């Protein structure tokens, strides 16, 4: 069975495309993106494994998919605040956070 490389199926899964999306959607996050990419690249070289780069693409691909929908990004921020405040039972908020991430991952082809 021949497998299509991830890059061919999802062109936005490449670090260059993700960086362009981060620059456009959330410019303030570019330094964190660059730092994560540098760390993932170093980890991949040190461990001789692509796992750190796959994790990087997964994390930032989902982030970009969330940020493409301002209302979804705002809802996620609100839910994260609810959980971190610790004032109410976080069960429903955590479930909705997971749902948002799952939808974003599906949109990003992750």
Image (cartoon, helix red, strand yellow):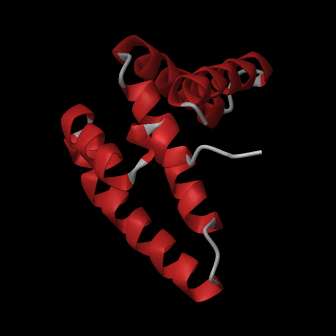
In the picture provided, is 101 more to the left or to the right than 62?
right
Depth order, front residue of 9/91: 9
Depth order, front residue of 47/26: 47
Q: Residue at x 75, y 16 (%)?
A: 92
From what the image shows, is residue 26 above or below residue 102? below
Q: What percent of the width, then of the height, locates residue 52?
A: 59, 66
Q: Residue at x 62, y 83 (%)?
A: 48
Depth order, front residue of 22/28: 22
Depth order, front residue of 71/33: 33
Q: Residue at x 45, y 28 (%)?
A: 65
From what the image shows, is residue 45 above or below residue 31? below
Q: What percent of the width, then of the height, locates residue 23?
A: 21, 43
State the count of labels: 0
Q: Quadrant of the N terminus?
A: top right
Q: Residue at x 64, y 84 (%)?
A: 47
In the picture provided, is 87 more to the left or to the right than 104?
right
Q: Quadrant of the C terminus?
A: top right
Q: What percent of the width, then of the height, locates residue 21?
A: 28, 38
Identity of the residue furthest to the top in this view: 71
Identity of the residue furthest to the front in this view: 1
Q: What percent of the width, then of the height, locates residue 40?
A: 50, 70
In the picture provided, is 90 more to the left or to the right than 57?
right
């Amino acid at each position: 069975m021949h497998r299509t490389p991830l890059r061919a199926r999802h062109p936005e899964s490449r670090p260059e495309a993700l960086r362009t999306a981060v620059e456009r959607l959330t410019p303030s996050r570019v330094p964190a993106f660059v730092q994560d990419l540098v760390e993932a690249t170093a980890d991949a070289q040190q461990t001789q494994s692509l796992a750190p780069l796959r994790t990087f693409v997964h994390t930032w691909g989902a982030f970009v998919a969330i940020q493409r929908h301002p209302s979804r990004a705002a809802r996620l921020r609100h839910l994260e605040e609810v959980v971190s405040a610790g004032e109410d039972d976080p069960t429903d908020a955590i479930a909705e956070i997971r749902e948002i991430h799952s939808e974003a991952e599906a949109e990003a082809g992750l």
